[in-house]
Image (tube, helix red, strand yellow):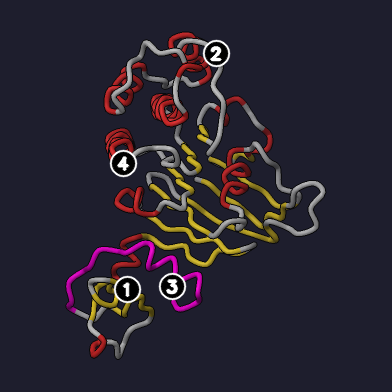
Amino acid sequence: MIQVKNISFKYAGQKNLVFDDFSLELEQNNIYGLLGKNGTGKSTLLYLISGLLRAKKGTVSFDGVETKLRNPETLQEIFIVPEEFDLPAMSLDQYVKINEPFYPRFSREVLEECLKDFELSTNVKLNALSMGQKKKVFMSFALAAGTKLLLMDEPTNGLDIPSKSQFRKVIAQHMTEDRTLIISTHQVHDVESLLDHILILSPQKLLLDASVSEITDKYTFEYRTPDQMEDVLYAEPSLQGNAVIAPRKEGSAETQMNLELLFNAVTQGKI
């Protein structure tokens, strides 16, 4: 569905490449978690996939069409929610009337359901909202657009604790079989329960590209005492004991993935 093939990219005026001969393939009907330290290119990758940035070399394709061509038929199937954005000084109703024609499957019913879950009215002035409220309105519009591909950059930044729970609810309710969602985030605890597949970036390289089921089939995530560390691949001290990743033994029960622990282990080259 999404094919990133041998791309190279750098920003104008910068010496170092963000990506150099980088490739990636993403399948339909998955929620991908895109993780990486600051400066590893997470946001850049989202913008390249959406067609808002163009690779210097290589290709980025969605359903077989290069996104850099910005064909209307392709763009109507892609929606990106950036980390920071502005909304115009108008009512939500006016905004919807102007923008919904660009998305053939736009659903006002879905918009109203998402806003209700976020405890927001449809009768709002966009410029009168707080940043957190604007983010909830824009994410509601994004889900209502009905695109096959939805990209979100740090979607839970600026949301309070109840709103983060509401975010997980609206995502779970409005994912469809023909939709792919990529969430770039540092806030792993906010999205951990939603993810089907984990992507971990380092500068110019993909460190991990694996489904959650592949990860939990291969590894055990648990707490251990100091005398139980013989087969541990990675460990961090915690109040409950040592949080560890170890090879999963045949016949043992599957454990819940600890995404923060996994990220630290992968970026430190432990697994």
- Residue with the mark numbered 4: 161
**Mark 1 or mark 4, which is nearer to you?**
4
Q: Residue 270: within the magenta?
A: yes
**Image coordinates for residue 146, horizontal then vertical, percent:** 41, 27
Callout 4: helix, strand or loop?
Answer: helix
Q: Earlier in the sequence, mark 2 or mark 3?
A: 2
CA–CA distance in space, label 2 to label 4: 27 Å
Q: How many C-alpha atoms fall within 10 Å of the one at disc 2: few (<14), some, or many (≥20)?
A: few
Task: Please check the rendered image and state whether residue 265 is part of the magenta-colored stretch, yes or no.
Answer: yes
Q: Are marks 1 and 4 in contact (CB under 8 Å)?
A: no
* Residue located beneath label 1 in the image: 218
Give coordinates of residue 100: x percent, y percent. 48, 16
Q: Earlier in the sequence, mark 1 or mark 4?
A: 4
What segment is highlighted magenta in the picture? 251-271
Residue drawn where x is 18% and y is 76% of the image: 252
Q: Kindly identify which numbered label has been placed on residue 41.
A: none
The kind of residue tagged 2 is: Ala
The spot of residue 174 in percent (x, y) is 31, 33
Going by the numbered disc 3, the residue's amino acid type is Ala
Instruction: Give how far across and how far down residue 249 sits, in percent.
Output: 24, 81
Q: Mark 4 or mark 3, which is nearer to you?
A: 4
Q: Which residue is mark 2?
A: 89
Checking the image for residue 265, the label placed there is 3
